[in-house]
Image (cartoon, coloured by chain):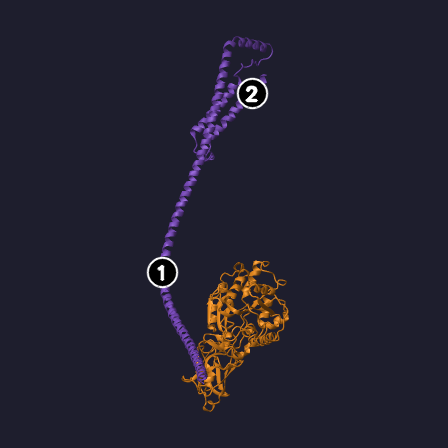
Amino acid sequence: MSEDLYKRAGVEDLSEFYRTKFVSDEVLDARYFSALDRFDMRFARTMWVYDNVRANSTALDLGCGAGMLALLKRKGVTLAGVDLSPEGALASRRNGYDFTCAAGLTRLPFADATFDYAVSLDVLGHVGFEEKDAVLSEIRRVLRPGGVTLHGIECTDRLAQKSYEEMTDEELRRFVAVDGHVGLEEEHEHAARFRRFFPHVAWEPRYALCLSSEEFIKQRDEYGLPFESDFVEYLRGLSHAERRAFDMAMGYVFGKVSDLNVRLPRSGLYVFLKASDAPLGPFYNEHRDRTALLNRADSHAAAAEGDSATSQMEAPRSFCLDRSADFDDGWYEPNVLPPVARWMKRRGRIRFRAASLHSLRLDLTTHVPDLGPEDPARAARPVVLELLLNGRRLSALSLFRHGWLSLVAEVPEELTLARDFELELRASRTWRPRPDDARDRDDRELSIAVCNVEARL
Amino acid sequence: MADTEVENTLREIRERVLAAAPARASEHAPANTTARNGGAAPSTRGGDAGEALARMDANLSTTARAWSRLPPVLTNRRGALARVELRLKRLIKRAAHWFTWEQVNFNSAAHNALGDARAALDAHERALSSLREELGRVREELTGLRADVESGAARATELEARVSSAESRFDSRLAELQGALASGLDNLRGEQRARTDGLRDALRNELRDRAEGVLEEQRVCFRQLSLEASELAVKQDRARRAVEARLEALEQRREG
């Protein structure tokens, strides 16, 4: 039936459909995760799973997509993923999953009783009604005894929305084109279905209160939810920084609702659901331990600080700051350019500790238009870049071309033993990639992209 | 009765005179008078036939006058002489009736034969006239056709002259165009060669720039991989040291 619905909706190639919808160049690798992003509404579901999964356990991500559960690697979880799209499986693998493959959910390529957790986020709404029982049966099969399955499930409210049978072909095409939902059920129907396979089921309606700015706009524009129009228009006019602030506030409230165990009224939008063959623990924060999430310091920093007393190998002469230093809010989240690099706003700071520091090395590029004399019709406007270490200028240069540039800056002798360092980069100008693109707006103020920031001892 | 017969006789004489007048007029008429009959040449036989028919008509009027009876008994005298003369004439008429009546019958037969001959001749004359008219039309058509053929021949001659002139103009224009085409092709080849060279240079530069970009990107990616490998090595070393420390601790605990 789901295939019929997809066909009726004009979706011929499911794998390609999901690749274009859910695979992006964003970096979800746990090593790049900024602790502050735990409040980002975008990671609210991930954090619910993160706080409910035991450290060093094994977990299967059903419909892993780009790899939203990569953060579980911070807890030492052995993480596997399956996705309908081979590109999705590959993206998850790149984001740190231990094993991924392209497969359907009705025939999981794993042995019985393999995982402690089977997790899906925004997946069961894409599974057709006739396949749902088969998927749940497979989940039960691959779970170890006492294993828990956790799901974030999109729902529908039949009082407010037409059923699939009631939709015309055009309505169905528009509905499915938004996210690919062909198996939406009401909240209680999900719980009832899970009870047929698991004796212990708990669920909570979520997202009645908190949505990201992007989701508010989408739910109103694409699904016709009755949010106040002036509010949605206000959200639509927000800049990237303002949207991020809004999403952080929403994520903060979302997390507090979980922490306070507040039961929200049904919304017909979304449920969190836990099920197991064993009695369930608390619905929220069953295994909350954010130490690894908050602690960025890793072996490099330790090594950099001279933690080599017991080391039998040669102490590293340099260490990379990309995944261990503290990047302030002058930096955007990492992107796959390739390589994995962070875009900077007009000014960005990187804080790190080192026992000693003799030089800094980094790779940088820019996509700012009208840089140099390669376009004779326009005047050259190079990006002027300054590097400062602990407030002292190390170097200044002008970028006249778009390629990658390796930059090495010597550290003045009086700063080499400072231990706490703050590298600051300042760019003379920025640009916005797609400020007016209604479908794929990107109004970030970008100057340079930086990676491979290396502290040489 | 006698007056009526006199009147008839006078009318016949007048008609004969009137009938003879057009025949004489036609004999002395100018040539263009006959040309009015479809332009046909004057026919002597036709003219003789008309005259003969006119004479026949005059004779028929005579035979028609008394073909079935004898002439009336008349006198120009008056009185007793007149009565005697009339009585005598009546006696003679009655006495000569045996052969005069035969004469009357002969007259009647001659009159009828002449009438029939007149009708046959009329029919022949009409047929001849229509044939003459048909002949005139055919002659006219032939004349028209001859004129058409002559004008067509003139037109063909003119066209032939024009075609010949156009051919010579075409040949000269063709030669001119062939010359222009040859020189244009030379120019085009030159321009094309220059453009191809330019494009090849631009493509070479673009490829070189892109290759440099890819090499740069590759260098940065390799650098990233190298740094990650270094991180992993450090982590591995650290884990190994931790394991060794725990093993050592376990060993010490076992010994202690």
In the image, A10 versus A311, the foreground residue is A311
Residue type at numbered disc 2: Asn
Q: For the residue labelled by badge 2, is the local secondary structure a helix, a strand or a loop?
A: helix
Whether A131 is drawn above or below A370: the answer is above
Whether A102 is drawn above or below A402: the answer is above
Q: Earlier in the sequence, mark 1 or mark 2?
A: 2
In the image, A176 versus B230, the foreground residue is B230
Q: Is residue B42 left or right of residue A137?
A: left
Q: Residue furthest bottom?
A: A414
| Snapshot quadrant of residue A438 | bottom right
Work out which quarter of the rendered image holds the N terminus of chain B and state it. top right
Work out which quarter of the rendered image holds the C terminus of chain B and state it. bottom left
Q: Which mark is residue A398?
A: none
Whether A421 is drawn above or below A268: the answer is below
Q: Is residue A180 visible?
A: no
Q: Which mark is residue B8?
A: 2
Q: Is residue B8 visible?
A: yes
Of the chain colours in the picture, the one used for chain A is orange
Q: For the residue labelled by badge 1, is the local secondary structure a helix, a strand or a loop?
A: helix
Residue at mark 1: chain: B
Q: List the residue tagged with mark 1.
A: B178
Whether B242 is drawn above or below A112: the answer is below
Circle 1 residues within 10 Å: few <14, some 14–19, many ≥20: few
> What residue is rendered at 56% in x and 59% in y?
A170
**Residue A224 % position (x, y):** 61, 65
Circle 2 residues within 10 Å: few <14, some 14–19, many ≥20: few
Instruction: Please give the letter of the chain rendered in purple.
Output: B
**Residue A37 % position (x, y):** 55, 77
**Residue A44 % position (x, y):** 56, 73
Residue type at numbered disc 1: Gln
